[in-house]
Amino acid sequence: MSQILWKLFCDGASRGNPGPASLGFVVYNEEGTPEIEHGEVLGTMTNNEAEYNALLNGVKLTCERFSKHHSGKMLFLSIFMDSELVVKQINGQYRVKNERLKPLHQKIKGLLQPISYSIQHIP
């Protein structure tokens, strides 16, 4: 079965911590063309919650779009984020101690489980 590489760049932020938060992400397909561009206002939350929500929404929409258009092919998702905390928690280098982040972490790990992926911190 052939693998297709897509790239997800995502970010979440809050003004204040907690404060008004939003997220944004772009997914590039195998040709390097934007497949999905999305941004949304989240309400009041911490910066880390916004980062996790950006990743969760990005992975979810990417998997939905990919499966709809690439039946029978495997997705390799290369993820890029500026949140070192989220990247290290997803990679298993850090434990998730914050009770509000645990359910988001579990949802993301569940979405990533059936696909191949890498996640990298970009400063």
Image: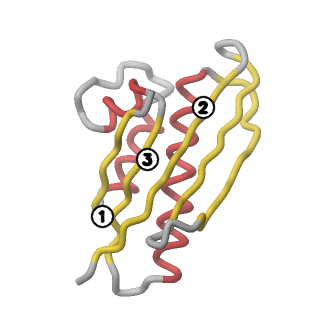
Q: Secondary structure at mark 2?
A: helix
Q: Residue furthest front?
A: 32
Identify the mark at residue 30; answer none if there is no mark: none
**Percent x, y of residue 95:** 28, 24
The residue tagged 2 is 50
Q: Would you call the spot at circle 3 few (<14 residues within 10 Å), some (14-19), or many (20 or more)?
A: few
* Residue shown at the point (23%, 83%) measured from the top left: 1
Does the residue at mark 3 contact the one at mark 1 (Cβ under 8 Å)? no
Spatial CA distance of label 3 from label 2 is 14 Å
Does 104 appear above or below 123? below
Amino acid bearing label 1: Pro
Q: Would you call the spot at circle 1 few (<14 residues within 10 Å), some (14-19), or many (20 or more)?
A: few
Does the residue at mark 3 contact the one at mark 2 (Cβ under 8 Å)? no
Does 62 appear above or below 87? below
**Percent x, y of residue 123:** 45, 27
Does 12 appear above or below 64? above
The residue tagged 1 is 114
Instruction: State the residue in front, 119 or 107.
Output: 119
Amino acid bearing label 3: Lys
Q: Secondary structure at mark 3?
A: helix
- Is residue 59 found left or right of 110 in the rendered image? right
Residue 23 location, quadrant:
top right
Q: Earlier in the sequence, mark 3 or mark 2?
A: 2
Amino acid bearing label 2: Ala
**Percent x, y of residue 44:** 73, 25
The residue tagged 3 is 107
